[in-house]
């Protein structure tokens, strides 16, 4: 892993930090000098990631946070400010697919899973609550702390599913589309205060969430065929985009959407 000072002195909260893209983003942030607070509901995995970062010489800790719980967000931000004196970066990465592994995929053109007329309200609400409401609550809670810090950077993980539709999982698409536009509203409302907000739109990345639809089955083949660069993403591919947007290198970047998908949506 490349180490450096791109986030030197910054205090960063990374949700979804126990696994996949969030864990790798935490590692990369710490390797570039940030103090990282990893948050998730998978406590054992989260503690392991934080321990690994500390063993490598970085600054990290793990906190339990259900992103759908506003009281937990308020308590988290207060305690991070009390301990570190400020908050500079919030990376909203926690998310769920909400679909059974058998559910079909964007590129296949075949609907083998639950069509939207059969998607339950309960399933819709569960997906929206984590993927969209969680981002709203995190942003709302972090803004006053970032104002006190003199500015900040909010990086929200949407998806290519927030840009295009598909044959599958309309609720997931809707939840990620909400993140995309919510990010632009955040950017506009807080630009004058030096608080930036940008969205990141991964294509198919090999993580515990996506793996069942990527490896060793028809959906995986269809997705690979639709990926011009000929491979699935790795968590580090996405983490490096988050790193840029979190850093002062992106000082004039707000309200933008960074697609990292091996060319899939360019096609
Ligand atoms: N992997 C992909 O192909 C892909 C593509 C586009 C977007 N994304 C998005 O990237 C983000 C990270 O996903 P990933 O692929 O690394 O999957 P992942 O399952 O490895 O990580 C998601 C993490 O979010 C956590 N989480 C879920 N609900 C939570 C809650 N209520 N509170 C706190 N944490 C919670 C999980 O425990 C898990 O650790 C998600 O928002 C996902 O929608 C992933």
Image: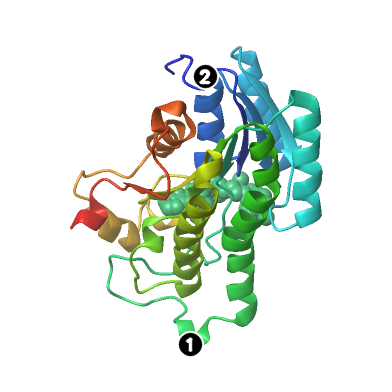
Say which residue appears at 59% left-offset and 24% top-offset: 10
Q: Is residue 220 left or right of residue 138?
A: left
Q: Earlier in the sequence, mark 2 or mark 1?
A: 2
Say which residue appears at 56% left-offset and 36% top-offset: 152
**Farthest residue in the front direction?**
192
**Quarter location, residue 23:** top right
Question: Residue 57's x, y, as percent?
Answer: 61, 12
Mark 1: few/some/many CA within 10 Å (<14, 14-19, 20+): few
Task: Specify the quadrant that holds the N terminus.
Answer: top left
Instruction: Please give the label number shown on residue 243.
Output: none
Instruction: Please give the label number shown on residue 117.
Output: 1
The residue nearer to you, when weighing 82 against 214, is: 82
Instruction: Please give the label number shown on residue 31.
Output: 2
Q: Is residue 110 left or right of residue 121?
A: left
Mark 1 falls on what kind of element?
helix
Tally the numbered discs: 2
The residue nearer to you, when weighing 221 against 235, is: 235
Question: Residue 44's x, y, as percent?
Answer: 72, 37
The residue nearer to you, when weighing 245 against 69, is: 245
- Residue 28 shows in the view: yes
The residue nearer to you, when weighing 74 against 2, is: 74
């Amino acid at each position: 892993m490349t180490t450096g000072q791109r986030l030197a002195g910054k205090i960063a909260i990374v949700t979804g930090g126990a696994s996949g893209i969030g864990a790798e983003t935490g590692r990369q942030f710490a390797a570039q000098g940030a103090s990282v607070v990893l948050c998730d509901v998978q406590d054992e995995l989260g503690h392991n990631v934080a321990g690994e970062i500390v063993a490598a010489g970085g600054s990290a800790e793990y906190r339990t946070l259900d992103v759908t719980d506003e009281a937990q967000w308020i308590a988290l931000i207060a305690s991070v400010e009390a301990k570190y004196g400020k908050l500079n970066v919030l990376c909203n990465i926690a998310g769920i697919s909400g679909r059974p592994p058998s559910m079909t995929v964007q590129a296949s053109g075949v609907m083998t899973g639950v069509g939207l007329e059969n998607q339950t309200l309960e399933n819709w609400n569960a997906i929206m609550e984590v993927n969209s409401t969680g981002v709203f609550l995190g942003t709302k809670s972090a803004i006053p702390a970032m104002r006190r810090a003199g500015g900040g950077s909010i990086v929200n993980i949407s998806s290519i599913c927030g840009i295009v539709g598909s044959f599958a999982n309309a609720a997931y698409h809707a939840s990620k589309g909400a993140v995309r536009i919510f990010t632009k509203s955040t950017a506009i409302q807080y630009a004058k205060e030096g608080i930036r907000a940008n969205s990141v739109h991964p294509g198919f990345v090999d993580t515990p969430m996506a793996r069942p639809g990527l490896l060793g089955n028809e959906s995986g083949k269809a997705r690979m065929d639709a990926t011009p660069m000929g491979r699935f993403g790795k968590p580090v591919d996405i983490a490096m985009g988050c790193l840029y947007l979190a850093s002062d290198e992106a000082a004039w970047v707000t309200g933008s959407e960074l697609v990292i998908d091996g060319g899939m949506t360019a096609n």
